[in-house]
Amino acid sequence: MAVFTGQGGNVTFAAGYVTNVKSFEVNVPVDIHDSTVFNPAVTWKSKTGGLKEGSGSYVCYLDTAVAIELPGVTGVATFLESGARTVTGTILISNVALGVDVGGGLSEVTFSFEFTGEVAFN
């Protein structure tokens, strides 16, 4: 079994690479609908998949090289993990959260986003 590590991951957003990426997460849930019909012999519910959607976040260490994309900005993003698998789609930044630690810890910025359409896994 081959496993993947986060040693080679990166994020591209719009026209360039996002710098100082610490981590990213992509979620793609599907709506689940109950399709059970009336039948005295039915003892289990039936389920049917519906529409999919995607969302996620990426975290960067903050410095002067990190462009802070504001909420409402859209762009094509590609998320690459060390095994060369990618997740690609157009994203809309929905939230930006800055975190600064007292005592010299590294400052971080977290970008939350929603995919605006199809998400491609390669």
Image (cartoon, rainbow, N blue to C red):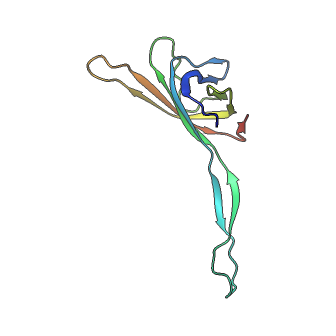
Judge from the rendering whether residue 38 lies leftward or rightward of residue 63; answer left or right: right
Decide: is 109 above or below 56.
above
Name the residue at 63% across, 45% down.
Answer: 28
**Could you tell me which quadrant the N terminus lies in?**
top right
Taking the view exactly as shown, the residue that stands out farthest to the left is: 103
Name the residue at 38% across, 21% down.
Answer: 107
Residue 23 position within the rendered picture, expressed as x and y whole percent measured from the top left: 51, 28
Closest to the observer, 59 or 91? 59
Name the residue at 54% across, 31% down.
Answer: 24
Taking the view exactly as shown, the residue that stands out farthest to the top is: 64
Taking the view exactly as shown, the residue that stands out farthest to the front is: 1
Residue 48 position within the rendered picture, expressed as x and y whole percent measured from the top left: 70, 64
Name the residue at 45% across, 25% down.
Answer: 109
Decide: is 116 above or below 43.
above
Residue 10 position within the rendered picture, expressed as x and y whole percent measured from the top left: 60, 23
Quadrant hosting residue 2: top right
Judge from the rendering whether residue 118 lies leftward or rightward of residue 13; answer left or right: right
Decide: is 38 above or below 117.
below
Q: How many numbered marks have been drawn onto this rendered protein structure?
A: 0
Quadrant hosting residue 47: bottom right
**Could you tell me which quadrant the C terminus lies in?**
top right
Closest to the observer, 72 or 57? 57
Residue 5 position within the rendered picture, expressed as x and y whole percent measured from the top left: 56, 28
